[in-house]
Image (tube, helix red, strand yellow):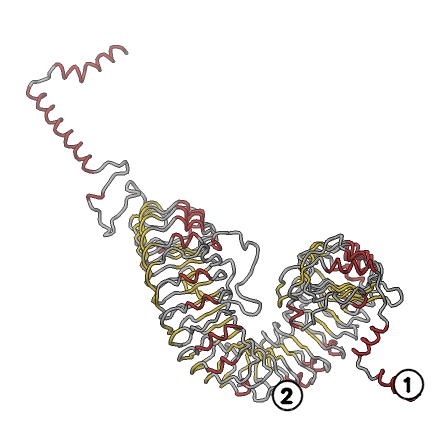
Amino acid sequence: MVLFFLIFFLFLSLPNSSLSSFSFNSSTPLCHSHESSALLHFRNSFAVGYSSYYCDLYSYPPKNLWKMGTNCCGWDGVTCDTMTGHVIGVDLSCSGLHGPIHPNTTLFSLRHLQRLNLAYNDFYGSTFSSKFGGFANMTHLNLTYSFHGCSSVGSSFAGNVPSEISHLSKLVSLDLSGNIDMRIETPNLKRLIQNLTHLTELVLYRIDMSSVSTSCLTNLSSSLTSLRLNFCQLKGKFPDNIFHLPNLQILRVAYNYNLTGSLPTYNWSTPLMSLHVSKTQFSIDLPYLISNLKSLKQLLVSGCNFIGSSYPTFLSNLTQITLLDISYNNFGGQCPWSLLNNTGLTFLDLSYNNFIGQLPEVTTKLTQILSSNNSFNSQLVNKIPSNLKSLILSGNLLNGTIPSWVYTIPSLFELHLDDNQFTGHIGEFQHSSLVYLSVSRNNLTGHIPSLICNLSSLIFLDFSYNHLNNMIPPCLGKLSDNLKDLNLQSNNLNGTVPTTFAKGCQLRSLKLNGNQLEGALPQLLVHCRNLEALDFGNNKINGTFPCWLETLLELRVLILRSNNFHGVIGNPKTKFPFPNLRIIDLSHNEFHGLLPTKFFMYLKAMMNANADKGELKYMGDRYYQDSVTLVMKGNFIVLVKILSLLTTIDFSNNNFKGEIPNVIGELRSLKGLNFSHNNLMGCMPQSLGNLTNLEWLDLSSNKLTGEIPIQLVDLTMLAFLNLSKNHLFGHIPQGKQFNTFMNDSYYGNLGLCGFPMTKVCGNDEGQQPSPSSTIQEDDFEFENGFHWKVVLLGYGCGFMFGLGLGYLVFSSGKPKWLVNIVYGGRHNKLRRS
């Protein structure tokens, strides 16, 4: 008996996992052979690759995909009914499955399924089959697709959510989130809401609901505990009654930019734990009653433009709050830091408001502090949580030196102190957990500390727009194994560019513009196969054109402006050079020779004018977006973000000669073209009229001749034109954009006439002045092509003939033969009439 109780006690003391394993193994039923076969056939219809970003981020363990004998009830992720042996649950989430789900897949033969989880795989935009509605006993269906940050990497399912889903009357949880090519129409959503009366969780995050009438959401089940409709393109008035559902715990309708409504002032759902209404049109002050939600742990109201201008102090009453985001609103004044008394608060975002005053000392459990773009004007505090992961204080008025604790917190993941007024030196970072580091746009001096190279986890490093000097630590090149974005522009750095870029280089952007760097570009940059933006402008770098950059197939931005490059840009050395190049600036160097015709022939990304039509994308990755300074329409413009459809060529201020090649007219995506201040000759090619996207054209200070091609009138996007200081002549084209250009567009072309010039086109229209602006007799021609010497010869012959004829008349009276010639015909005509 004692032995029995001892065994029983040991059994109860087993951990949960061991207990469940023990219980499972002791009662595992035998599955039916046809169901085992159906599962194997379904599994084998896919390739197995890498799992999704979401699975890697949260460390979901890979599944053992059914190589454990013939009994499917013992397979990883498969659950069977202990009485009947039928398969009632299949969980293949995070299994790395790749391939389409066919409408006749054997999965649909598992008629007893109650739970199906296919989340975080990639089914290549498979159609959402109506056969999913055939699982009569289904209670949980999860077809979630994963994202990289805020950007989808594709779509798992596509097309309409079929009406047959409403047949799943026992459904308790439905999650279709992340399938950006999936949409649901009003009739099907209305039918789904009416029939699924047991539904407690409805997640349609990122599903296209742009055509849905929000009124059909009014009849949601009173048993609903979670409703997640973020990024669904909902518009119209959000039903008030949803806030009053008695069991509602999670309500997320954020990033529906045209969703209107108001937060209620009475009868809230008291169990509410999470409320997300960011980036909606709930434009009303936060109601005081929200402070009565004692269970509220997450409140996100970013970008709602609430009417209240001062901080809602009653938020300090939310004693259970762990996550608070009131960024991008109109709150201002002194921030009442009493909210930090909520010891459970771990995430706080006050960014993009009008708060002033000093930052407080923080001793709570806060792990993420975001307070960028306010007007806090103190020094950084001396007390900060030791477990801090994110500190983002960009765009304030913070001053003084950066305190020493910044360099020692072991858990710090991202640090943004850019755009403040910090002074002093950059300290020695003593931890390796930093991934994102920016202290740009301050008044920091000294050199870049060598211990920065110990931050082996760095992905983004930005020290730009300071007063740093000395050399770039050579070891920074070794960080490129992990580093993706390196920005050191606008400092006083000298020496040479590091030459330690290894074969595994991961750099996506490298910006060293505006320093005193010398020497040649390191050819080892060819190892950085992912490079998209390369900016070495405004340095003292020398050498010939780095043709080896042609091999960087992802390169989109190349800035070499204002250096000491020289020589001829020859023919490409590779078969398909620069296929993605969109912005190239070689201005203010010493390049010479002909413009590189074959170079222009391969700029494929500049040729397809419709490649990005209808899409608004920016160059960069999910965390960091590129910026660049360009000469646009005659002015230096800083582009904080670079639209992917922006394409420009700037070869100005060099010594190029010869004619402008006709192939330029093939670059139909071009927004800007600048060949000014060179020695180009010949006529402007008519093919320039093909550049219908062109917004600025600068060919000034060359030796171009001929007339302005009439085809340029068709450039209806052209806002800036500079053809000054050339030898152009003839009539200036009229109509459309040409009616908006003033004299300065044509200054120095004395042969041009017509509006807007004061010179009116007359008989000498089309005449060409010489470079010295004086008419030389050897160059004077009439429009019909006769030379002036031929004309004078005719006048001379006529004059001599006239003199001879006059002598005969006056010496012999009226000779009859002459009288008959002159008058005879006349008498005959009179006689006939």
794 with respect to 74 (left or right): left
Most foreground residue, 346 or 821: 346
User: Which mark is drawn over residue 696?
Assistant: none
239 with respect to 527 (left or right): right
Amino acid carrying mark 2 in the image: Thr
Instruction: List the residue tagged with mark 1.
Output: 4
> Which residue is pictured at 18% across the width and 16% down the height?
823
Q: Earlier in the sequence, mark 1 or mark 2?
A: 1
User: Which mark is drawn over residue 363?
Assistant: 2
Report x, y in % for residue 691: 45, 50
Residue located farthest toward the front when viewing the structure as drawn: 69
Q: Could you tell me how many numbered marks the image carries?
A: 2
Most foreground residue, 445 or 726: 445
Residue 118: name its quadrant: bottom right
Q: Secondary structure at mark 2?
A: loop
Most foreground residue, 302 or 811: 302
